[in-house]
Amino acid sequence: MHNSKANRSAFVVIYFTIFIDLLGFGIIIPLLPDFSFKVLHISETMIGLVAGIYSLMQFFFTPLWGSLSDIYGRKPILIMSLTGNILAYSVMALVFSGVVLSLPLLIIARAFAGLFSANISAAQAVVSDITTREGRSKGMGILGSAFALGFVFGPAMGGVLSVEFGYGVPIMLSAVFSFIALMLCVIIFKETLSSDIRAENKKNFKGFALINIKAIKDVVKNVNVGVYVIIFFFITFAFANIYGTFQLFGERKEGLNLNQAEIGYLLSFLGVVGSIVQVTLIKVFKSKFGEKRSLIIGNFLVFIGLTLIPFSTSVTILLLVIFILAFGNGINNPMTLGLISQNVSRDEQGSVLGINQSLSALARFLGPVWGGFIYEKFGYQYPFITGGFFMLMITIYCLKILRK
């Protein structure tokens, strides 16, 4: 472990890296459906696949990056992932600016962006390296705020810049941000994993599988924690339904007729409300209702929010509905993660939370794919209505299970 100054600079670099990853993810959300439909002329189902493939790659590669960072150190893995991000965003910018209009190239670039954004496991490992056991939750919480801020600023930035300067500029900006993070990592970041621990890990290394089916099965079947992992998966899936379709709905719905910038603002509003709830109200809900009841309240609010989105006839009503959705999501996400963490022994924290992270990435892939498919087959209301239905089922499931 290094001195506190080195630890501080390491944390700043990691914070900035994660913020940039989520900024890049957020920037593209209001642009991707609009660009794919108007310029590439692809179906809603295909848009869902393009939106979701990023998270599918995270599902496969997050555990791999974590394992590699244990053997080769955190710094080389972070450098490699940021370099990959620069390349992926640069190629995407070529597609979005119309230099090379190619759907296969967009899918490949999007997949690579997801593959190289799987560096969250290496970033969390850095926080573990430089914090004490007591300070770990606080460190992870601060890292979590980098996620939230990236998602708060990303959609608004992507929407506004694409309206003003065209689709390619915001994507190029994502590449520039990744380059800045890379420079910080190369120049400032000091390795946080000692060489003797790396040598020991290398010696004990037994090879890695991209998906550890047995480990996933064990976690899901675990009587204490499995139920919460399943709940978190379906919460994420229902919410991710809107990633590929919210923009198309906002643009086409009579009485709304929103452009990318306005969609970006709405998605940023969703992020802001969720972040405020997580920062200010979690303790209040925890002490007043307890975690399990709070989880049920949060799930019910998300059910109401998702179901009412397609029936919003004006921006004012839509803002109110998004507020309910964000409020519920701001409660149920941290409550579920807290319950997972509390029901796992100390030596299993990392692996169980890692598997939960991995499964939630799979849910973020399946959500947009389902949303795009159901939108194309049945109409704009159905990604939201089916997402709401899943949340209602999860709320009833929580009521039954948590009573026991």
Image (spheres, rainbow, N blue to C red):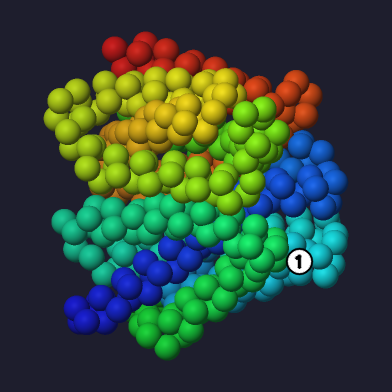
Quarter location, residue 336:
top left
Mark yes or no: residue 59 visible.
no
State the residue at coordinates (46%, 48%).
268
Vertical placement of 289 versus 332: above or below? above
Measured from the top left, where is residue 40 in percent x and y? 83, 51
Mark yes or no: residue 285 visible.
yes
State the residue at coordinates (65%, 57%).
163
Measured from the top left, where is residue 197 in percent x and y? 35, 74
Q: Is residue 104 left or right of residue 57?
A: right
**Foreground pick, 1 / 317:** 317
Q: Tag 1: residue type?
A: Ser
Q: Is residue 258 left or right of residue 338?
A: right
The residue carrying pointer 1 sits among few (fewer than 14), some (14 to 19) or many (20 or more) residues within 10 Å by Cα, namely some
State the residue at coordinates (53%, 20%).
307
**Foreground pick, 306 / 204:** 306
Measured from the top left, where is residue 266 in percent x and y? 50, 43
Callout 1 secondary element:
loop
Measured from the top left, where is residue 171 in percent x and y? 64, 65
Question: Which quadrant does the N terminus fall into?
Answer: bottom left
- Residue at the extreme bottom of the image, as rendered: 187
Q: Pointer 1: what residue?
A: 97
Question: Which quadrant does the C terminus fall into?
Answer: top left
State the residue at coordinates (70%, 61%).
167
Vertical placement of 233 versus 313: above or below? below
